[in-house]
Amino acid sequence: MDLKTQIISEYNESSKALKNGFVQRTEAITDFERTGFPTKKNEDWRFTNINAIVNGNFTSKAKSVLDAKYLDSIPEYNFDANIVLIHNGNYSKEFSKIKNPDKNITIANLFDTKDEIIRQYFGKYALSSEGGFTALNTSMANAGTLVHIKKNASLEKPLIILNITDAPDCIANIRNLIVLESSAKAEVSEIYYSKGKNFSNTVTEIILNENSELHYNKIQNSGSDAYHVGTTRVMQEKHSRLFSNTITLGGSFTRNNLDSLINGEGIDCYFRGLYLVKDDQFIDNHTLADHAKPGSHSNELYRGILDESGSAVFNGKIMVRQDAQKTNAYQTNNNILLSNDCSVNSKPQLEIFADDVKCSHGATTGQIDEEEIFYLKSRGIGEQRARKMLLSAFAHSVIDEIKNEEIKALVSKTLDEKLG
Amino acid sequence: MLSIKNLKAKIDNKEILKGINLEVKPGEVHAIMGPNGSGKSTLASVLTGREGYEVTGGEITYDGKNLLELSAEDRARAGIFLAFQYPVEIPGVSTTNFMKTAINEIRKSKGIAPMSAGEFLKRLKDKAALVELDVEMTKRYVNVGFSGGEKKRNEIFQMAMLEPRLGILDETDSGLDIDALRIVANGVNKLRNENNAFVVITHYQRLLDYIVPDFVHVLYKGKIVKSGGKELAYQLEEEGYDWIKEEQTVK
Amino acid sequence: MSEDIILDKIAGDYEWGFSTDIDMDTLPKGLNEDVVKFISKKKNDPTFMLEWRLKAYKHWLTLEEPQWANIHHPPIDYQDAIYYAAPRKENKLNSLEDLDPKIKETYEKLGIPLVEQQFLAGVAVDAVMDSVSVVTTYREKLSDLGIIFCSISEAIKEHPELVKKYLGSVVPYSDNFFAALNSAVFSDGSFVYIPKGVRCPMELSTYFRINAANTGQFERTLIIADEGAYVSYLEGCTAPMRDENQLHAAVVELIALDNAEIKYSTVQNWYPGDKNGKGGIYNFVTKRGICGENAKISWTQVETGSSITWKYPSVILKGDNSIGEFYSVALTNNYQQADTGTKMIHLGKNTKSRIVSKGISAGHSQNSYRGLVRVGKSADNARNYSQCDSLLMGDRCGAHTFPYFDIKNKNATVEHEATTSKIGEDIIFYCGQRGISEEDAVALIVNGYAKEVLNQLPMEFAVEAQKLLAISLEGSVG
């Protein structure tokens, strides 16, 4: 049975048991039945082969069995933060560590919470009609996090949504909703950690109201047989600030979609990303900075290091709509290729419908500068060491933007190990 | 040469100029001073024909002609030059090419044949020397990548090249250090003669140490509220604009 | 050079919108196997050509029109077009004096100097009226050097070995929908062969012209520069004003063998449609070249015409140390749509490519750059530099950049930069204050912006291109 048919049958079996409250489920499964998974004919999936997922015999029926000792071996679990634990697509209330400091802040299981805000925003910016993976998520997701920060409130300790997937052939459909009311502030990180073969499919919707500020990290550090498709849709109102870092160091197949609708003036939108691909890993980042209103700023920097048979896709789009005069939008994608078996497809796009704008993008693909290597060697540094230093410096221009020191240190350490 | 009578002008439906009167004769330098928002730059814009300004009353005659009927380029061709407060950048067009085009357009409007390459080059070198501008700068695109001071100097260079009859300097001194200010002012002084005139718009008195005006006018809330000799500028420098404002309130 | 050219003021409407009344030998509308056979017979094709055309036609039937470009138009009814039209007089002329006076007049209006001075200007012209080659000049001088410059239909008859070997070798009939269509029904075009080590002493030039209503135009050009040869080829086109959209699907193939160089320049100003987007040419062109070792192919294009342009002149850098270049100015105004760019396919070692694309959008137009840089596994030390700039005038047009990079070699260096700027009222006022009218200011800025591309054109083309840019943008600011 192919995955689509299997999912539809699992949905029909279990839909009654799925936590409801979401009318969107029925609509989504119909959408999914209609569209199925995307194919290469779709421009957004042109370089992305999802056969391994579609033919992957995944199931959404995995259970969660956890113990504290196991969790203690995962460094992120012990960070000085609020921790939401999602295990095999289930919300673990027992092992989550949430210190809701005041009534202005809600961190809870999205599917087990009554909050008017859910009805207001759920499915509003990530539409199931837009693609098979979102439709799949909307119909099947049964766990995820609601973050709701009320007006002027600030989340004191950062939040880590730790997604652990370790049941064999498990599909984890995870759904998050992050709403910052005006002048609210928070730091939220999605961290992915997996063992064995499995597939996580996440949709995160983020609403940043006027003058709010979100630091958002997405760290993928899964095992070598992990498949991940993640969509993050952001809606930004005026004067809001988004600082996002998308770091992909692990996994067999990763597709990150990150879109922001820049829907007011004075907005700052930062997209930063780092990817390191080795073996036959595949990493695909699709981003969209969608300037719908005048007078805002977006800035994107994605850097990638490719080795062995790894391959990467970068597709970054800046859209400046007709009303969005006085937009400043910048985008850069840099890739370093270390082997002749790796490949990169980069597609930085500008779509501009307004005339009074400053937009630029740049893309480079190349190698480590041999002159620089020589310079380091002439100071007595060994060749291997010199290469690693330069690669590390290349990556750190992204890593250094991560505000959370513990996460930054962990990413640095992992990168260091992976660079060998 | 220039006669402004009871000039009133609006932008975005807001009245900025509320009845300006000014007479400028050949050989004269007029300074127009005033606090921020008094209408100084609006006056420069209306004189040179910038779009978006609606003249609601009064008249401007220049050499006996109704200036308000002329397009921006026809005013320039008639010898009115504006040194911009914020000169724009024109990527892809070198200052040399820009000036050559301007000179020949102006000549064409008068039925004069284009300037020969030799004559143009000579003028370019002479005028660059006059404003202490490196000739190499004229090969660069108009104002692209120039510092604030370089842009202002380029404005004066262009003025020298076009030899206008009426030069209007709109806050040419703002953003200039004392050396640049001296160079710019020297350039203007060398261009002064009995046939041309200058209107120097400034917020500060210091430019007037170098370009000595025959008349100083104070613009406040869209009207010239005080006129005098250069001593008026010193008074403004020492006492600020508050006494003017008070005087007006009392009235 | 181009900086010093003072622009002429030229009237605003499409200056070259007239049509000549010449008896046409025209097929009824529609396309089927018999039409392909008719064209082939009309052209006195040898059997191998007829077979090739029929294979292409059968393949075309299996294809669908591509949908991925950023262009929008009502569906094209391929059965509603006429696939063959030729001027009656097919016999070759002994001298220019024998030319049909109407055709001569047409060319004079176009500014093609079909007179002796042309020889002094060093231009040989292969003029194409609709689909049949009418007159070819200076062939003898060229043939002394062993250069073949003739219509493709002549080449098919007189040099079948070259045509057989190279036609479809760079753009096979199966390449894409429009290339297949062209392969089936092409009626004429140009053929150039430069023998080993010969440097063609003059610019070769062809002027295309669509002249009959509802006539599909399917030109086929094949240029072969043998080892160590050099040729510069100019293509220019203007079309008379017509209300109905006309389809144009040309194919150009360039073959630069080892150490050879081909420079191919185009100034395209087919009728773009009127101010409301009515009429205009649909221009779906496949242009591609292939380089041997140390060879170089350089495409330069100035695109101001057509209501729709779909065009990606490309270079396959097969030989080691070969070089590909693409210089383009694409200007769209009113309701024009352009989706144009290039493909640089690096296969050989030490191959280099350079892309300079300057888009100018005004009115309600949509202008897209779409380019691919591919570096294959074996292309060690491949280098690419791309610069894609957009200039916008007015707030109802769009400028889009879709570069694709597909890199599979670790020693490749690929760099891309893109910027967007505008001509705004502040710049127009600044120029006006210096005595320069709006029209001249736009011309000045646009020519400065496009200079890097215009400088690639031969002098006489650069002048025409500058005029075209200025004419096409009249009244676009404010």
Image (spheres, grey):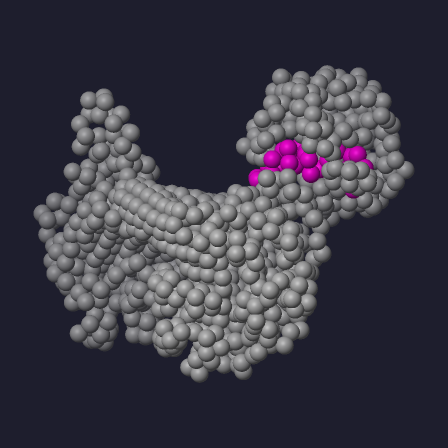
Locate residue A410, reporting x and y percent: 21, 39
The residue located at (24%, 71%) in the rendering is A4
Residue C399 or C150: which is nearer the viewer? C150
User: Vertical placement of A7 versus B135: above or below?
Assistant: below
User: Vertical placement of C92 versus A322: above or below?
Assistant: below
Any magenta on residue C452? Answer: no
The residue located at (46%, 78%) in the rendering is C41
Check the picture and name the quadrant holding the N terminus of chain A: bottom left
The residue located at (54%, 69%) in the rendering is C132
Residue A134: quarter of image: bottom left
Residue A408 or A63: which is nearer the viewer? A408
Check the picture and name the quadrant holding the C terminus of chain A: top left
The number of callouts visible is: 0
Any magenta on residue B91? Answer: yes
- Side (left or right) of C304 relative to A175: right
Residue A46 or A291: which is nearer the viewer? A46
Residue B166: quarter of image: top right
- Side (left or right) of A279 relative to A25: left
Locate residue C350, reporting x and y percent: 31, 42
Start and end of the magenta stretch?
Answer: B74-103
User: Vertical placement of A152 versus A394: above or below?
Assistant: below
Residue B170 or A372: which is nearer the viewer? A372
Locate residue C426, reporting x and y percent: 65, 42
Determine if residue C102 is in view. Answer: yes
The residue located at (62%, 52%) in the rendering is C118
Determine if residue C370 is in view. Answer: no
Locate residue B94, reporting x and y percent: 60, 35
